[in-house]
Amino acid sequence: METRRNITTNTVGFCLLPSELIQYIIANLVLPDIFVLRTVNKFITSVISDRDFVRDYNIRSSSATWLFVYKKRWHRDAMLHGFTDCSNRWFGILIADVLRSVVPPGEDLYFLTAAGNYFLFALNTSQQVISVNPMTKTVKKIPPSPLGRRGTSSWRRSGIKLLSGSDSFRFLFAELYEDYPTLFVYSSDTDKWRSIRAGERETDNEIPRGNIKTESDFIYLSVVNGQSESILIAVGVEDFDRPVVVRPRFDGGGIERFAVGFSSGHTSDRFHVYGDGNMMIVRSDSSNGDTDRRVRMLKGVELWGMSQSGRQWELVSRVPEGLIEEIKKPYGVMMGCVMLKNGTFRAVLMSNYEGVWDIIWLCYDTEEKIWSWVPLPDCKMKNSNMAGITFSSGLTLA
């Protein structure tokens, strides 16, 4: 009873503040907090529902970057954990109730990607893809692509992209189809797929410059990533009809073993993570000289971008040794994802050692040529079953 009285008293006191100050305070909150706050009373709900407030908040929110991690509880509720560079704590987003209407008990879910208020999940048993909007509490089954139903292992993070609007989205992925790099596009407006075979370019001027310093209005989707060569599709953000094949070569491989996107300690000395036309190389070695190769220690992170011609991978920058010393820890397995947005390259490395998950968030300012580290609070996911991690643009008010 005393707690209830304190909440009521604090709410009344907050509502007595000048309206401009109230709007300013709410506008600086992240969306999960706003959703909680708008249930307090009608006055605060009216402030949050005001059209001008919604417009201004969404403009500010669109510049934020979120990191989402999908955590499966064994035979219990599913949980999305989100962290934004505008806050200093993790936010939990329960999605079990939303999923229950379309996901049967025992189904195995994998978190694919996110953009805005839309989150895509792959269902391994039924081999379907669903979109979830936690803000409106809606879920939608996406019809099978022209390639048919696919299990979770068929989706490659570097080969997919989600583009969101206020009430719709487009899902893109790239694959080799009948030996040709092909772009597949789903639109939620039409609920239909399109497939477009990518063409081979005739000159270097046919594609946007792939170099990280010249970010453009083009999307890069990975088709194949080999030890010495990659195959990507470049497509315009607003024009999906003329995708172009790009084949950058990599001469920095040597004879080291490597893995793509996911590294287990006993199989690789480096692994590559691709995204947005860039490549991150993570180099490791045995922990403290231990002969047991199942335990590795991070020793270097490199950022590579495409050359001006798009025909070569070129080294952009290395994470300074001093920063490596701060972030390195022993690990057994590691996964990663990368994103280039507004001139900043963001990378996340998620590793596990003896059941403890550790997340490293790195940023590289392409203008200032400076690396930085975003310390993350403990996500309290020890011994959790992790099933997907991705960067995303800011959440918005409906």
Image: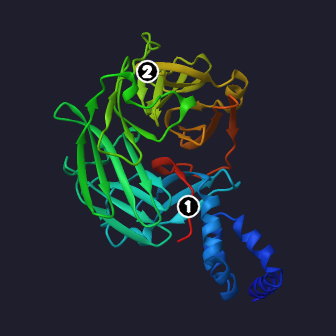
Residue 395: mark in rendering: 1
The residue labelled by disc 2 is 309
- Is residue 286 shown to the viewer in this render? no
Q: Quadrant of residue 207?
A: top left
Residue 314, percent across and down?
A: 51, 19
- Give the residue type at disc 1: Leu
Would residue 266 appear left or right of 367 to someone viewing this image?
left
Instruction: Report how far apart the C-alphas of labels 2 and 1 lie in the structure.
Output: 36 Å
Disc 2 crowd, CA 10 A, few/some/many (<14, 14-19, 20+): some
Pick whichever of labels 2 and 1 is earlier in the sequence.
2
Between 371 and 109, the one lying in front of the other is 371
2 vs 1, front mark: 2
Would residue 86 appear left or right of 188 to someone viewing this image?
right
Between 329 and 65, the one lying in front of the other is 65
Check if mark 2's residue and mark 1's residue have beta carbons within 8 Å.
no
Disc 1 crowd, CA 10 A, few/some/many (<14, 14-19, 20+): many
Q: Quadrant of residue 226?
A: top left
Residue 76, percent across and down?
A: 44, 65
Q: Secondary structure at mark 1?
A: loop
Quadrant, the N terminus: bottom right
Between 173 and 241, the one lying in front of the other is 241
Q: Residue at x 65, y 66 (%)?
A: 56
Q: How is the image coloured?
A: rainbow
Residue 174, percent across and down?
A: 31, 40
- Is residue 293 shown to the viewer in this render? yes
- Give the residue type at disc 2: Ser
Residue 328, percent across and down?
A: 64, 29
Q: Secondary structure at mark 2?
A: loop
